[in-house]
Image (cartoon, grey):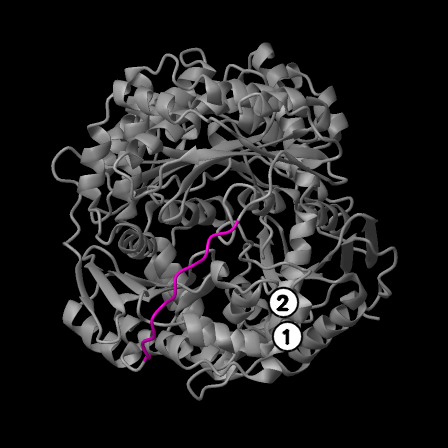
Amino acid sequence: MNFQQTTLSNGLTLIAETNSSVHSVAAGFFVRAGSRDETADVSGVSHFLEHMAFKGDDKFSADDVNRVFDEIGAKYNASTSEEITMYYAAVLPEYLERAMELLSALMQPALRVADFEMEKNVILEEISMYEDQPSFVCYDHIMSTHFAGHPLGQSILGTNASITALTAEQMQNYHRSRYHTGNITLAVAGNCRFEDIVALAEKYCSRIPKGESIRALPEVMAQPTVRTVVRDSSVQQHVMQMGPGPKSDNPLRFAAELLSVVVGDDSNSRLFWELVDPGHAESADLGYSEYDGAGAWMNYLACSPEDVAENLARCKKVFDEVNVNSIHADELEQARNKVASRIVLRGERPMGRLSSLGGNWMYRHEYRPIAADLQTIRSLTLNDIREVLNRFPITMTTTVAVGPLKDLGVCPDTAGP
Amino acid sequence: MRVNSSEFRYEERFCQGLFESFSKSQNPFMLQSPQSFRLSNGLLVIVEPMLDVQSAAVTLLVPAGGVRDADARCGTAAILTEMFTRGAGGLSARELSAAMDNLGLQRSIHVGNAHVTFSAATTADRIIDALPFIGRMVTEPHLADEEFEPARDLVEQSLMSLEDEPRQRLGKVLRQYSYAAPWGNSSEGELTDLPAITNEDVRRHYQQFIRPDEAILGIAGNVNFDQIRETTETAFGGWESAPVSDLAGGTMPLSPCHIEHDSAQTHIGLGWNTVPYRDARYFEAWASVSLLSGGMSSRLFTEVRERRGLCYAISASLSTLRDEGRVFAYAGTSTERAQETLDVTVAEILRLHEGITEDELQRCKARAKSSLIMQQESTTSRASSLARDMYHLGRVVSLDEINSRINALSTTQVRDFTIEYAPKAMVLVTIGPHALNSACVTSLS
């Protein structure tokens, strides 16, 4: 694998990791635009815009975009998070030019009013679809509660009301403010030659305008909160908890990641043995999420409503025990082996490399080859784990539950009974 | 379960019978030919060396899935599946987990209708050390009494979760209305049957059905055949053979079926007959479903979502047993637009034979080709394809052969197939606040 980068004549950054031993190549535009960059009057516009990108530009109609991507057998899609909108396609090497041409067209969509009004229906359906998935409802509420008053608390999908009221003109303004070279990175991973990609990028990306935009990075001031969203018809209770963790530029993030595996991976973790193995809960896990200027621990619990109070107490006991006594050397070693294997397996496919390539660049302007990630994982010690626990103990400030329960019996200040 | 923070514009597609994944005009399929052997106890092992990768993956299919659950004991196989990791071969659950984690072994055990499937992957240099642990779980699980209740509790909890997820639940019900018992039975279990199931039932299920005679082990990755052969002999050689009995066929309920649910959307499921994977005309069936729902330029996506904005999620995919096949279609839509969605979807399915163009078929072929080629980048998907090919066909179809057969398809062939296999009856299952007018479906039969 070979990494190279360049800046195109219009200022667009291009990064690439080439690898001649794979069969495909993946390309993606990573745009620093997400729900945190929206104002309240355009809530949901980043995600809606991502849909509208596929409606084409001056050259390609909506039908053309779908048709041509299928003609070249592309595996393509897009996603929107709180912070990043990404558009990608994985193709066989001979179709890279066509894929680059189409992906570039997505960056400068026509945003036709008729398409906009039609796609609005699809977005409203998507909102309804997620309403029928309790874990997503829970996620939406934990984000808006934990990050209340902070841009990260803003909903990715928006609401029925915000989407219904949104106009094509508002979307055009938003697009102008975010989709420029200062905010977009083009990443390519897989079987291709760097000089070819540079030539393709110069050919197709020159229309992306120059520009800079600033993202506000206020501190998160989470207040201890317990919130229930009552759904009488639900059978299970879904609970999420969040507490502060290392920010995306904090070197402690690696230790945080390993710690979350020891404490809350979906198998062979502290939470697994305490809650899932004995059959107390269907799921109980702990993850670490990094954001621009913020970070969080997030605990997810799914179980019968009558067991919630007891299970939350079990989670808290696990966290408290780890906060005081840290973890054992053999647990750290198992987590290292687990994570190292995941990195290698995920890295075998160009699509797997693309997200790592783009993610590291968007958050930290750095390139990390697989070998560096493995090296970092191997070198982490119990001292590193202790340090992350000292600075970011696993303490949940926010609890949100979705299900039949009206009261969780949880004290906001201790996140325990 | 991890909740993802991003919302995809498009759904990840179900695998379309090609089992996921198809490049290059010269010979793009550079895999070495798979080699197979059979252990004396009957276990069939099939190995495909992949020299460009660093990993190795295994898939073990054991014909002990939900179809083998006894009457009124639906969920026995599901509970047994939960038991394998709870101690085996003298190792406690924790010792077993620790050993496999230290080998970087990513693993899962899944209960399906036909099979209990053990899947695992790690870096190629460690697969030889990992196989014996999989062997222990399969051949020497403790099935201890004290582990039974927790295992049953977990199966119960996942069934309760299903009640809250109308789309997932729809899949289960649609299957029940599409395949006669026991093939339509829920492999996840039934809440009403769980209380009666005992550890004795689980042990009996293990004794009767977790046997090597018709089990298949697929291995793909950067591995050495001789070494694999030696290791599988050691890891699985002691697994005792016992004949597998035939299955008695049953009946299925008649649709349409509506399940009232206080949901935001109405979830619509449709099913109709097609040919199974082993049929000579399978690739025609694959192409017809691909025209309907293979890519974002396919007919359902274009007509129902892009032109009319009726839904976010719409798809159709092939389901195949060894001897029977179905097409299952799904749409999720708000209640006031559900009737129109159903009517438009059924109309598109029924007019599938009209106006099939060369370009349309060519797009299906292009997607298939890139999928097949990308499969060579994933040991996990190769291992699974190897095992499934052996189950369905008794041989492995090379990626090259699949590509040639798909390339040879003509629009006439595909059109003739869609006419011959046009739905003569359709199963309709809906979950949502109100039942729909099912005339568009019932008028067929």
Q: Residue A391: in sight, yes or no?
A: no
Residue A374 in the figure: left or right of residue A296: left
At mark 1, the secondary structure is: helix
Q: Residue at x 74, y 45 (%)?
A: A144
- Give the residues drawn in magenta, as a range: B239-250
Q: Is mark 2 in CB contact (under 8 Å) with mark 1?
A: yes
Seen from the viewer's position, the closer of residues A37 and B105 is: B105
**In this picture, residue B305 sits left or right of residue A103:** right
Chain containing the residue with disc 1: B
In this rendering, the count of numbered labels is: 2
Task: Name the amino acid type tagged 1.
Answer: Pro
Q: Tell me the residue that label 1 is attached to.
A: B150
Q: Position of residue A210 (x, y in %)?
A: 47, 24
| Three-letter code, disc 2 | Leu
Q: Describe the element under mark 2 as helix, strand or loop.
A: helix
Q: Position of residue B422 (x, y in %)?
A: 42, 24
Compared to residue A100, the image places residue B323 above or below, namely below
Q: Is residue A406 magenta?
A: no
Q: Quadrant of residue A76?
A: top left
Q: Is residue B167 above or below residue B97?
A: above
The span from disc 2 to disc 1 (Cα, nearest Å) is 6 Å
Task: Residue under label 2, please give it.
Answer: B154
Q: In this view of the protein, which residue sits in the foreground, B438 or A276?
A: B438
Quadrant housing the C terminus of chain A: bottom right
Majority secondary structure in the magenta region? loop
Q: Position of residue A184 (x, y in %)?
A: 47, 33
